[in-house]
Amino acid sequence: MRRAPLLSGLSIASIGVSLFIIGLFGVAAHNVDQALSGAESRVEVVAYLRDGVDEELVGLAGAEVEGYPEVESVTYISKVEALFRASRELPEFSDVFSDLEVNPLPASLVVQLQNRSRTPADAERVAARLAGYGFVEEVRYGREWVDRLYRIRRVVGGGVLLLGASFALGAILLIGIAVRMAILARREGIAIMKTVGATEAYIRRPFLAEGLFTGLLGGGVAVLLTWGAYRTINATLLPLEWVPVWWVAIGLLGAALLGMLAATRAVRRELKKIDVF
């Protein structure tokens, strides 16, 4: 790499740009996932109760519902508390609420789901169980909204995998080309080494190291470029969160392994074409 700095530099820069695009998409995917997680935390199943139901019976049912594996917590909202919340959240209707002679709002059980259970299937299953209680008049959980949220998460995850695989393939091709050119430049020396008895493993080792370091340095360039883009967007356009540190570590390790994989493939093919003297 020191003897051919231009070739090495071009390879590292090309790989860095390829992985930089993956990094940008990773930052975007992480922030979308954070936004979706925040929205998912508000996914809840609400069971509206019939008037005149015994609160002790509701308490027993709430304890039973809280034992469901999909459920994180159950909160009982009385008719009085429901009216108070409505007047607080809808101040423009405060005069209407104050003039009411009869409280029209029902009591309810608000069911928060576990993180892993905020899916359409789990929400529907909990809603169906709640509807089975005789004192429950209606159950709602925003089915269309939950379905749409879950669909967005799946699309984002699939896009990350597809884009990552595409640019990883491009990086492998770039590293393979660089290693092949390095082998061709040292073709005569390699032939002499094979003539005097050097094994292929001995000859292959420095090229594998070159592929590993090329991938690792390209990954480092990608991290720096991604960090710069993140800081610029965060300061000028919209607030973003940086990806977890373990994402960066896995990215660098993956870049190094990609480099070694590409070098292994290129060396295996090119060494077979070199004849001993």
Image (cartoon, rainbow, N blue to C red):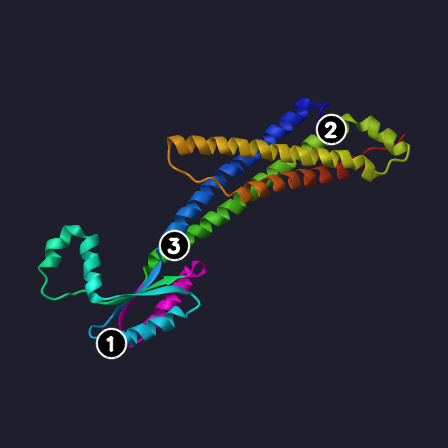
The one of 131 and 42 positioned closer to us in this rendering: 42
Measured in 3D between alpha carbons, the distance from the residue under mark 3 to the one under mark 1, in whole angstroms, is: 32 Å
Q: Mark 2 against mark 3, which lies toward the viewer?
A: 3
Q: Does residue 58 belong to the magenta stretch?
A: no
Q: Amino acid at mark 1?
A: Asp
Q: Residue at x 63, y 32 (%)?
A: 217
Q: Which of the 4 quarters of the picture holds residue 191?
A: top right
Q: Residue at x 41, y 55 (%)?
A: 150
Q: Does residue 126 belong to the magenta stretch?
A: yes
The first of marks 3 and 1 along the sequence is 3
Q: Amino acid at mark 3?
A: Glu
Q: Amino acid at mark 2?
A: Ala
> Relative to 102, is 165 above or below?
above
Label 3 SS: helix
**Residue segment shown in magenta:** 114-140
> Mark 1 packing: few (<14 Cα in 10 Å), some, or many (20+)?
few
- The numbered disc on residue 54 is 1
- The numbered disc on residue 182 is 2
Q: Residue at x 19, y 64 (%)?
A: 80
The first of marks 2 and 3 along the sequence is 3
> Relative to 24, is 189 above or below?
above
Q: Mark 3 against mark 1, which lies toward the viewer?
A: 1
**Disc 3 target residue:** 40
